[in-house]
Structures are given as C-alpha cells and as structure tokens.
Image (cartoon, rainbow, N blue to C red):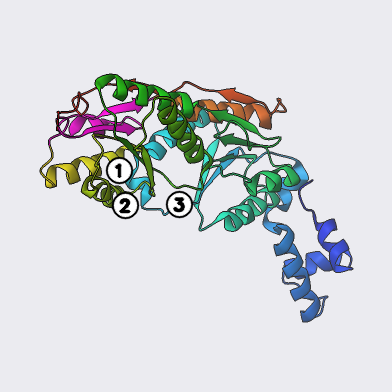
Amino acid sequence: MKRPTIADVARRAGVSKGAVSYALNGQPGVSEATRQRILAIAAEIGFNPSRAARALSGSTAEAVGLALCRPARTLGIEPFFMELISGVEAELSARSYALTLQMVADQEAEIAVYRRWWGERRVDGVLVCDLRADDRRVPALEELGLPAVVIGGPGGTGGLASVWSDDAAALVETVEYLVALGHRRIARVGGLPDLLHTEIRTEAFAGVCRRLGLADAVTVPSDYTGEEGARATRRLLSSAGRPTAVIYDNDVMAIAGLSVAQEMGLAVPGDLSIVAWDDSPLCQLVHPPLTALGRDIPAYGAHAARQLLAVIGGGPAGGIQDETAHLTPRGSTAPPRER
C-alpha cells in the first residue's frame, strides 16, 4: 500500500485537489463543512500537507521508528531496553539515520502511530518489539507496506523481517544446570504472559521440567517490575513446598527476589539459588552477585537496525537467528541444603 497523497484525499472527499489544498492550508474557496470533511479524511489516512514537499521530491526521512507499548518509567529501570536502544543508535548514527522513539498505550495506538509516521514520511521503516501471538501489528504493517524488522520470534512475524534469539535453548540449559547442582524444586517468575517470548520460555520450562521429572516446577507470571517480582517471590517462598531455586525473566525482578529472600531470613545461595535473565551490571553489584543468562544486547540492537536498513534499501525480508543467551554462574547459585 502506497503512502497517501493529496489525490487520495480528493478522491475520498469527492472534490478537486485544489479544494483539498484550500482546506488543508486554511484558505478560502471551500465551505466550512467541506473543510472539516477533508481534514477528517486527511487525518484518517495519515496525509499531512507539511510533508508534501518531501513526498513530491521522493526523498527519504533518514529516520527509523520504535514505538514501545510500555510505561515510560520502565525505560529508566530496565537495562535491557536501554542497552538495546544504545545498539540501535550506534548502528543508525554511523549511517546518518535518526531514531524516533514513542511510548504508546496499546497496540491500536501503536498501529495508529505507524500509519501517521508512514503517511507523513517521518520514518523509512520501524523496529517492532514485544511480539505477541496473533499480533495485530504484523498484518497492519504488511498492509501499509512499511519496511519493518521484528525483534523477536521465531514465528509469528508473517512476511516481516526478524532478528531473534533461541530463548528455549537458554532456559533448558539453565534448568539442567540447576538440576545438576541437586535442585528438584525449581520455580520461574515469568514476564508478561501474552508476549510471544514469554510463551516460548514458559513452554520450554514446562517441557524440560517434565523430562527431568520435576513435578513441583511452577511458573508465576509477572510484569518485569521489581514490585511484582517481589510479590511473586513472597508467594513462592511462603508456600509449603517452597522452591530451592528460582529463575527470573529479567534482572530487575531477580534483584527484588534476592531482597525478599534476605528479608525472610533465607540465605542465598544456601537456602535459595537465584538465576536472572538479561545479565547486566546490576547483577554483579548485588551481594551475592547473581548467576545470569546474558548476551550482547547492544549488538542485538545493532543487528536489528542493520537488517532494517537493508530492508529499507530493498533487501530481502528474512529471519536472522542471533546469539543464544549463555549462562554465567556466580555466587547466587549452589547445591541446596538438606532439609
């Protein structure tokens, strides 16, 4: 689907292109009712006259967009996105491209942002995060014809390009490591349950626990925040058959879990072993330092940006498997005490 033009507005409104120009520029020559109808149609299809000169010249925006459906405050407390964006920025700046970042309330708002960006020629392509099962953004982007790279997968990306990491393999490695230490009661505090990568991790955790005969394994959903991570940890550690090891889907929740364990008088790692996903400097600053799954997140962002620039340039929209997160054992994991 091509970007909207003044001719598209005129055709939908049933008026001439001149009438559209008068209406959009606030000039006399059309009735107020016609002006309002034209303005409404222009807004609906994402046509903005302030971008007309760029549209006529065929020039590019030399910018890519990233819309995040998360509270803005999470960017300041979750290292993953800051590291991802730093990698994206490094790759884009080397190519004289800018990054347009916007926080949105939900997927419908995100799709509306894509339509506006594309219609107004503000971006040449977009990066898509937090893929969901049957994600409405995928067909919307395909319909628009807006170049896009999904950071996530595999699967669920339709005809869009993607960069993804094998989260299932990383989770299996972690559970096998904990079992090798002697743990039999292992729990996981997961991220937002409707995200595709959370589903992949949950299925992988359940599968490896069944294979290894861990009947008491359980996943508790959360939202990546320290507050919810702490609540989930308290519930787990207050249960009759409390786990001897917990895997957290990000570093912020793992650090909150460490604090809760210490508040409850449990020794880490003697009474409870802790593993964090997304290794970060925070994991190494706490006591004991956290065993963590880590990868080069800035490089992950740079690879996604590089692929998007290739797609914008007419390259194929394929899927690229990036590095799998690797486990770094530290002081927060050890064999469980007998009890």
Q: Could you tell me which secondary element the residue under label 3 belongs to? A: loop
Q: Are marks 2 and 1 in contact (CB under 8 Å)?
A: yes
Q: Which mark is residue 302?
A: none
Q: Is residue 95 visible?
A: no
Kindly identify the amino acid type of the residue bearing the numbered disc 2.
Answer: Glu
Does residue 58 appear left or right of residue 102 in this picture?
right
Does residue 81 appear left or right of residue 313 in this picture?
left
Measure the alpha-carbon separation of dots 3 and 2.
Answer: 15 Å
**Residue 192 in the image: above or below residue 334:** below
Residue 271: in magenta span: yes
Residue 82: in magenta span: no
Going from the N terminus, do you reach mark 3 or mark 2 first? 3
Q: Which mark is residue 253?
A: 1
Going from the N terminus, do you reach mark 3 or mark 1 first? 3
Q: Which residue is mark 3?
A: 70
Q: Which residue is mark 2?
A: 228
Measure the alpha-carbon separation of dots 2 and 1.
Answer: 8 Å
Measure the alpha-carbon separation of dots 3 and 1.
Answer: 16 Å
Q: Quadrant of the C terminus?
A: top left
Q: Are marks 3 and 1 in contact (CB under 8 Å)?
A: no
Does residue 147 appear left or right of residue 8 in this picture?
left
Q: Report the mark closest to the observer, 3 or 2.
A: 2
Kindly identify the amino acid type of the residue bearing the numbered disc 1.
Answer: Met
Binning the other alpha carbons within 10 Å of mark 3 as few (below 14), some (14 to 19) or many (20 upward) gives: few
